[in-house]
Amino acid sequence: MPTIIDVAALAGVSTATVSRVINNSGFVEPTLKNKVLDAIAKLNYQPNLVARGLRSDSTSIIAVMISDIENPFYTAVCRGIQDVASEHGYAVMICNSDEDLEKEHKYLKMFAGQRVAGVIISPASSKSSKIKVLEDKGIHVIALGRSLSATADYVGVNGRLGAKMATSHLIQSGATRIACITGGKDVTTANDRLDGYLDALEETRIAPDIALQFRGNFKVSSGSDGVEYLFRLKNPPDALFIANNQMTTGALHTLANIGVVIPDELLLVGFDDFPLADVHKPPITVVRQPIIEIGVAAANLLLSRINGEASSVKSIILAPELIIRGSSLKTTVKSASR
């Protein structure tokens, strides 16, 4: 395997210059930088991240802990993180907790043992996820989508506003008995989206009904469970707001199975866009998050911490967007008389 010495020899520069180019640290005259990059490409040189970590007490690896690898939201977020990390000479390691606190804690201990440069985490629980094992090692942590402790930076979307926008739209579309399927009580995003739903009801003086509020776990199965519960009610809903894309998928399958017609019998809005939402029949109205931007913002914030840019704990809150499609619009019934 080629070494940094081989790269320096081919480029005709010092190993220190090669190191500055690889780590994107310090000024390198553009002509010399191009020679180094050409040499790296010709030799197919790959930096030894582990060896670098032994010398600097941390690796050039950013660890990303996501809560559900099957959720397309996290695929796009990781793309944003990867783009920024690669540009700055960092590799990205992705692990999936599957909303399991025990599995999450094992990974966090592994990150601490491997001396990763920093961690971006979508915690399994806003209350019970423990990052002290990282903080004790001086490893910077960014909470993604779900807030954590008062000492952790946070990047996410204004979910409360997005949920309010969705519910207000359903009210404007003529719904009067609106249900909400959200996540567990220990996840901030679940609570924020429920609060936004309640904000819209309060603003229009619709009395909230606890029977229309279903707590799931942000997985496909709980969307199905929520629909089954709601349509066993003596007075089922005429509209439904669902707090993430996975639960929306499960809800749509079950609604089709029990014969509920959207939007004729039920208006529906989901939080998070998802593949084929716009070609579903009818197309699904969603609250869209700027997903790539979330990943980019999280990676940039983490890199600023790694580079020693001191400041107080920071929260970056991005704005959601309501994408109105056919699932939330009542169809026009033509009169039989002319």
Image (cartoon, rainbow, N blue to C red):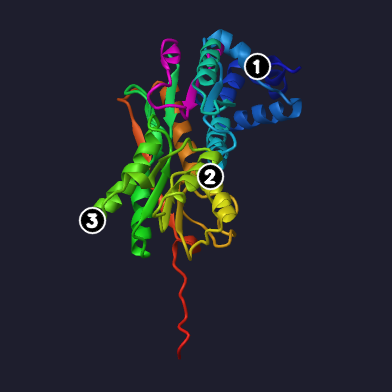
**Label 2: how many Cα within 10 Å (few below 14, some 14–19, many 20+):** many
Towards the viewer: 220 or 320: 220
First in sequence: mark 1 vs mark 3 = 1
Residue 23 visible in the picture: yes
Give the amino acid type for the residue marked by disc 1 in the picture: Asn
Q: Residue 42 in the image: x percent, y percent?
A: 75, 29
For the residues labelled 1 and 3, the Cα–Cα distance comes to 62 Å
Boundaries of the magenta span: 114-137
| Helix, strand or loop under label 2 | helix
Give the amino acid type for the residue marked by disc 3 in the picture: Arg
Q: Which residue is mark 2?
A: 224
* Residue at x 69% of width, y 26% of height: 40
Q: Which residue is mark 1?
A: 48
Q: Residue 246 in the image: x percent, y percent?
A: 53, 43
For the residues labelled 2 and 1, the Cα–Cα distance comes to 47 Å
Residue 307 visible in the picture: no
Is 337 a magenta residue? Answer: no
First in sequence: mark 2 vs mark 3 = 3
Label placed on residue 205:
3
Principal secondary structure, stretch drawn in magenta: loop
Give the amino acid type for the residue marked by disc 2 in the picture: Ser
- Toward the front, the furthest residue is 234
User: Disc 2, disc 3: CB below 8 Å?
Assistant: no
